[in-house]
Image: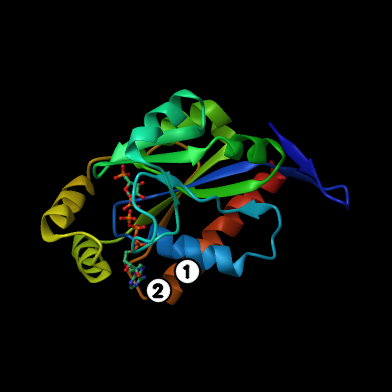
Amino acid sequence: MTERHTHDGAVKTGLLVLVVGPSGVGKDTLLDAARERLKGAAHICFPRRCITRPAGSVGEVHIPVRAEDFGQMARQGAFLLSWKAHDLCYGIPRHVQDDVAEGKTVIVNVSRSVIDDARSLIGHDQVRILSIRASREVLRKRLESRGREDALDIERRLARASAYQVDGNNIVHVDNDADLETGIARFIAAIEIDQAIANRA
Ligand SMILES: Nc1ncnc2c1ncn2[C@@H]1O[C@H](COP(=O)(O)OP(=O)(O)OP(=O)(O)O)[C@@H](O)[C@H]1O
Ligand SMILES: O=P(O)(O)OC[C@H]1O[C@H](OP(=O)(O)O)[C@H](O)[C@@H]1O
């Protein structure tokens, strides 16, 4: 297990925190709030994802990659984790593995389909899952109000909502079915629980 020694001699364990859940549940919104509120915590990082989506789209700030370049980048080892969804390709930059090895807590939004890959690559004890949940009715309303996808795309995203089970160890469920401030408070509390558990490990 990789560890970081702080100036007071305490030992900290590196962590990869995977934020997962169906489209529209609020992952990026919660991540943006946590990034802002935890910016004083130097050992916590929120890396941007590489996505074959044009720059400047509604929603998260990402690193835009041309679809024709993504495959070659993947073959050259640019990504620790990568997947396809919604006719797009997504990649988590390779440096995340080094950040965790240095004892940092790295928090990223990933597809539920790559959880087991992450556990194999990083180690089961150092991967923690924050599974964000909301009802299907809430997902629909949020996708419609976000306005990034058309009606057909929204239906496809809702159909995918129940496509994966999130199971195994180290999972914390965060209900984001209430107002945003409540969701943010629950999300940050879940991050702090993960930190506390890791630092006792
Ligand atoms: N608790 C909340 N209350 C009200 N609106 C919310 C809440 N959480 C998120 N939203 C809104 O719901 C919409 C979807 O949120 P967001 O884009 O963060 O979801 P996501 O899980 O990242 O989806 P995707 O996987 O498609 O990127 C956004 O417009 C966001 O402002
Ligand atoms: O349904 P699964 O595979 O768990 O999630 C698939 C992907 O869908 C969403 O994409 P976006 O953020 O809307 O681009 C998520 O962020 C995730 O990367």
The yes-or-no answer for disc 1 within 8 Å of ligand 1 is yes
Image position, residue 170 (x, y; %): 50, 42
| Whether residue 26 is situated above or below residue 126 in the rendered picture | below
Quarter placement of the C terminus: top right
Left or right of 93 in this view: 148: left
| Whether residue 191 is situated above or below residue 177 in the rendered picture | above
Image position, residue 36 (x, y; %): 57, 68
Name the residue that disc number 1 marks.
Answer: 184
Q: Nearer the viewer, residue 139 or 50?
A: 50
Residue in view at x 20 percent, y 51 percent:
157
Q: Nearer the viewer, residue 140 or 8?
A: 140
Mark 2 packing: few (<14 Cα in 10 Å), some, or many (20+)? some
Q: Secondary structure at mark 1?
A: helix
Instruction: Find out whether the residues at labels 2 and 1 contact each other: C-beta distance under 8 Å.
Output: yes
> How far apart, in angstroms, are the residues tagged by discs 2 and 1?
6 Å
Residue ranking furthest to the top: 75
Quarter placement of the N terminus: top right
Residue type indicated by callout 2 = Leu
Residue in view at x 42 percent, y 68 percent:
183
The yes-or-no answer for disc 2 within 8 Å of ligand 1 is yes
Residue in view at x 21 percent, y 46 percent:
160
Question: Hey, which quadrant is residue 179 in on the image?
Answer: bottom left
Residue in view at x 24 percent, y 45 percent:
86
Name the residue that disc number 2 marks.
Answer: 180
Q: Nearer the viewer, residue 65 or 9?
A: 65
Question: Hey, which quadrant is residue 123 in on the image?
Answer: top right
| Whether residue 34 is situated above or below residue 87 in the rendered picture | below
Residue type indicated by callout 1 = Ile
Q: Secondary structure at mark 2?
A: helix
Q: Is residue 150 visible?
A: yes
